[in-house]
Image: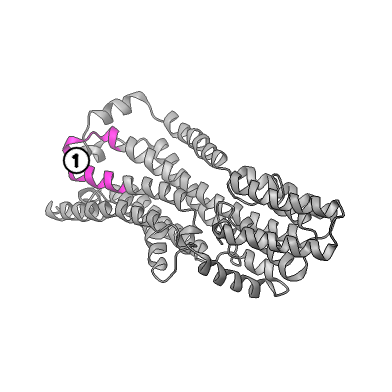
Amino acid sequence: MVDSAGPTALFVVLLLVSCALPLAIGLFLTRRHYPSIRYASPHQTAVCSSFAAILSVGTSAMLLSQDSVSCGSFNVFIYLFTNAGFFGLCVTQLTLVLTFHLTQQLALHNADTKVGEKAKAFATIQRLRRLLTPHSIVAKWVVGNLVWFLPPLAAVDAPLVTNMQSTSIANCLAVPMNVVMNGIILLQILLFIVALVVLSLYLSKVIDNFGLRRHYQVMSRVLASLLCLECLCVVFHTADVVAAYRLRYVVLPLGGIAVVGCQVVWPLLQSRHEAPISMHGHEDHSSKLAVLEDFLATDDGLAAFSAFARLEFSLENVVAWKAAFEFKKKGGGDAYAIYSSYMSVGAAMETNIPDALRQHYHDIFIKHHRRVSQGGRTSTVASVIADNDVQTAINQDPAVFDA
C-alpha cells in the first residue's frame, strides 16, 4: 500500500505550479512586442496555452478533492479541454506555416519579372490572405472542434454515463473502462501529436529566426513521452502506485505545464535579451532606416529581410519600406507604379495600415501621378518632388512602417 501523504503532496505541488501558469501567460501578453513573442502569434498562443493552464489547474484541483467530484464530470472536463487545447495548437502552428509561406510568396512575387509567374504568385498570396484572416482562423478552430468532438461521444453508452456520474473520482478506476472510447481518445491525441510534428517540419529553418520550430518540436517530444506514459498507466491501471498516485490523470497537468513551458515560458526567457519592437520618435526611425538601407543594398536584400517574418502581415510594411528606399536612393521608377504595386487597395503587397493613413499615402502618390501625366514637370523635377513627398510621409508617420 502507498501512504496517502505522498499522492496528496504531489497533487498540491502540481496545483501550485499550475496556478503560476496564468501569470506566465499574462506576462507573455504584456511582452508581446518583443521579437521572440511577437513572431509567435501571441494571441493565438495565449488562447491555446490558456486551455492547457485550465486543464492543469482543474485536474490538479479535482485530484485534491476526489470525493466531491463525479467521475463523469471529471472525464468530460478532461476530454473537452484536452481536445480544444490540442486543436488550438495545431491551428496556431498551421497559421505560422501559412504565414511563413506567405512571406516566401511575397519575396518571389517581388523578385520575379515574368508576367505569368507574377499572376500565379499573386493568386497564391490572395488565397493565403483569406486563410489567414481572423474570421478564417476562428472558423477553422470552431468547425474543426465540433467535428472532432463527435466520434468519441458516439462511443459512450448511456449506462456507462449514469454509472460514471454516480461515482466519485476516488472510485473512478473501479468503473469498467469503455475500451472503445478510451482507444479513440488516445488515438486522437496521437494524431494531434503527429500533426504537430509534421507541421513543425514545414516551419522554414531559413525564415524562423526565433526558435518557433524548435519550440514546437520539443513540445511534441515531451507530449509524445507523456502519451506513452499514459498508455502504460492504462495497461497497468490496477498497479498500486498507478492507482494511488492517479498517474493516468497526473499526466494531464504535466502535459499542460509542458505546453505553457514551451509556448510561453521559453519565449519569455528569450525576450529578456531583446529590445521591444516599437518606434516612439524620429531618432528610432532614423536608426532603423539606416540599418534597412545597408541591408537592402545587398543583391539578396529582400530575400534576407523576408527572413524576419512578421505575423499580422507586417512583412508587407517592410516591402513598402523597400519601395520607398528604392525610389529615394536608386530611382526605383514611377511613384504611381510603386503605389499601385505596394500600397493601393487590392495590391499584391498591400500594406497593413489604417484607412486614414492609406488615404494619406494615396493622396501623395495620386498627386504625383497627375503631376507627371499632365506633363507640367520634367521627369527629374517630378522624381525630386515625389522623393520629398515620400520622405515627408515617412517623417510624419514613422510608426506606419513598424518593422
Q: Residue furthest right?
A: 375
The image shows residue 188 at horizontal and vertical percentages of 47, 43
Tell me what residue is drawn at x 32 percent, y 45 percent: 54
Amino acid type, callout 1: Gln
Above or below 49: residue 177: above
Q: Is residue 384 magenta?
A: no
The image shows residue 202 at horizontal and vertical percentages of 60, 58
Quick check: can you spot residue 62?
Answer: yes
Q: How crowded is the residue under tag 1: few (<14 C-alpha within 10 Å), some, or many (20+)? A: some
Tell me what residue is drawn at x 47 percent, y 31 percent: 150
The image shows residue 238 at horizontal and vertical percentages of 25, 47
Q: Overall secondary structure of the magenta stretch?
A: helix
Quick check: can you spot residue 236?
Answer: no
Determine whether, in the image, residue 262 is placed left or right of residue 380.
left
Tell me what residue is drawn at x 74 percent, y 61 percent: 385
Observer-nearest of 402 and 249:
402
Determine whether, in the image, residue 80 is placed left or right of residue 116.
left
Quadrant of image for the C terminus = bottom right
Residues shaded magenta: 56-74
Figure quadrant of residue 3: bottom left
Determine whether, in the image, residue 202 is placed left or right of residue 165.
right
